[in-house]
Amino acid sequence: VIADYLTDGPQSALDDALIDTHKASSVDYSLYPTYDDGLFSINAQITSTASHAEVEEIILMHIDRLKEKPVDTKRLSTIKTKIIASDLYDRDGTLATTTELTECVAVGDWTRFYTFTRDIKRVTTKDVQRVAQTYFTEKNRTVGLFKGRSKAQPKKQ
């Protein structure tokens, strides 16, 4: 839910803050469900008009905002509906259903296949805020910057 709130499309917080202002050409997330606590990452492809520090500051500001103020209930409802619909589409067909069920087994709870929709429907604005406060801490954070070589720099042999 937090991932979609921050990065999923034109209504997302980081799309407004980074894409619409031309500070990034894209922003998305990576989250792979695992049995143990896993890695959640936010990825922004910054433009030449922005700096790494500026984009990092904007991302962290939006994460901090989630900790301080609950998300709008209407926006949360839209996100939950989209997540549930996506999950149902991911189960279209025998192979897709088998794959989804296998993923649930891999994360340690095959019943998640049957309870996922119910669990998403139960998410409240307070839950989102609590999770942001619990997991999005400075202690849990690693920031990585990728700086590609400029076209003017020759490739080293």
Image (cartoon, helix red, strand yellow):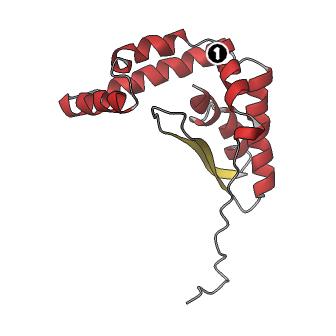
Q: Relative to 2, say whether 123 is above or below.
A: above
Q: Is residue 40 left or right of residue 65?
A: left
Q: Is residue 88 left or right of residue 69?
A: left
Q: Position of residue 9 (x, y in %)?
A: 57, 36
Judge by depth and name the residue closer to the eye, 39 or 48: 39
Quadrant of res 110:
top left
Q: Residue under circle 1? A: 127
Q: Relative to 112, say whether 43 is above or below.
A: below
Q: Relative to 108, say whether 56 is above or below.
A: below
Q: Position of residue 15 (x, y in %)?
A: 66, 39
Q: Quadrant of the N terminus?
A: top right
Q: Give amino acid for label 1.
A: Asp
Please identify the residue farthest to the left as the structure is shown: 94
Judge by depth and name the residue closer to the eye, 23 or 64: 64
Quadrant of res 58:
top right
Q: Quadrant of the C terminus?
A: bottom right
Quadrant of res 20:
top right
Q: Is residue 122 left or right of residue 94?
A: right
In the structure shown, which secondary structural element does the residue marked by tag 1 occupy? helix
Circle 1: is it few (<14), some (14-19), or many (20+) Cα within 10 Å?
A: some
Q: Position of residue 12 (x, y in %)?
A: 63, 32
Q: Which residue is at a point 78% across and 31% down the rendered structure image?
A: 64
Q: Which residue is at a point 73% across and 25% down the rendered structure image?
A: 133
Q: Relative to 88, say whether 58 is above or below.
A: below
Q: Which residue is at a point 69% across and 48% down the rendered structure image?
A: 142
